[in-house]
């Protein structure tokens, strides 16, 4: 009897080891297939990251921006800022980059509208808004949007602050 129990015990031990070995092989196989699938997805199927797309757009912008358009120099603006004490003012010189001579002519004719719009917008700003670089960029973007509304269908390529003094 003891001899019969020992062979059965020996048969059970290798069976457990073979099941354990089977699970290890299956686990490693699943990890390899999962890693290969992830690699294939990232390499072939994943959408491009925003940074790569932005780089592609910036390259086209640089190509188009490398050609300088027609420039229109506007007279300086001196406005009071929306300060409760009324002691701060802003002096700004703006130059507009336009697509062509016809757009410059149209902007020259629309100069009173453009000046009025700039004055109304700048007087609504306070000191904290115009002192940070982000605030200046926001002012530039808002001016460009408003200028393009007035100048439609012509397009203003860029706005340059050639002087920006806050006192």
Image (cartoon, rainbow, N blue to C red):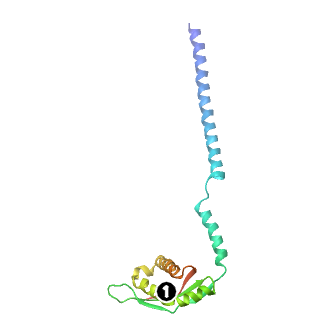
Residue 112 or residue 120, whichever sits in front: 112
Q: Residue furthest left?
A: 85
Quadrant where the N terminus is found in the figure = top right
Q: Is residue 93 above or below residue 141?
A: below
Q: Is residue 36 visible?
A: yes
Circle 1 sits in a helix, a strand or a loop, which is it? helix
Q: What number of labels is visible? A: 1
Q: Is residue 167 visible?
A: no
Q: Is residue 75 above or below residue 60?
A: below
Q: Is residue 142 left or right of residue 156?
A: left
Q: Which residue is mark 1?
A: 114
Q: Residue furthest bottom?
A: 75
Q: Is residue 23 left or right of residue 76?
A: right
Residue 103 or residue 86, whichever sits in front: 103
Q: Position of residue 99 (x, y in %)?
A: 62, 82
Q: Is residue 57 left or right of residue 117?
A: right
User: Which residue is rendered at x = 56% and y = 79% of the image?
Assistant: 153
Q: Count residues near mark 1 (Cα–Cα under 10 Å), then give few for <14, some for 14-19, many for 20+.
A: some
Question: To which quarter of the image does residue 95 belong?
Answer: bottom right
Q: Position of residue 127 (x, y in %)?
A: 40, 83
Q: Position of residue 47 (x, y in %)?
A: 61, 56
User: Which residue is rendered at x = 49% and y = 86% of the image?
Assistant: 114
Question: To which quarter of the image does residue 72 belong?
Answer: bottom right
Quadrant where the C terminus is found in the figure = bottom left
Q: Position of residue 125 (x, y in %)?
A: 40, 82
Q: Residue furthest top?
A: 1
User: Which residue is rendered at x = 60% and y = 17% of the image?
Assistant: 11
Residue 4 or residue 56, whichever sits in front: 56
Residue 117 or residue 167, whichever sits in front: 117
């Amino acid at each position: 009897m003891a001899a019969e129990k020992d062979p059965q015990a020996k048969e059970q031990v290798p069976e457990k080891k073979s099941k354990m070995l089977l699970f290890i092989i299956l686990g490693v196989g699943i990890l390899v297939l999962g890693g290969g699938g992830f690699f294939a997805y990232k390499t072939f199927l994943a959408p491009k990251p925003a940074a790569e797309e932005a780089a592609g757009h910036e390259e086209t912008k640089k190509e188009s921006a490398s050609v300088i358009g027609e420039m229109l120099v506007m007279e300086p603006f001196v406005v009071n800022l929306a300060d409760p004490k009324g002691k701060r003012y802003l002096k700004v010189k703006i130059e507009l980059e336009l697509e062509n001579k016809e757009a410059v002519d149209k902007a020259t004719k629309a100069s009173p509208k453009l000046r009025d719009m700039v004055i109304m917008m700048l007087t609504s700003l306070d000191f904290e808004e115009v002192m940070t670089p982000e605030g200046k960029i926001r002012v530039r973007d808002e001016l460009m949007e408003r200028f393009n509304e007035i100048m439609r269908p012509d397009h203003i390529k860029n706005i340059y602050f050639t002087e920006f003094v806050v006192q």
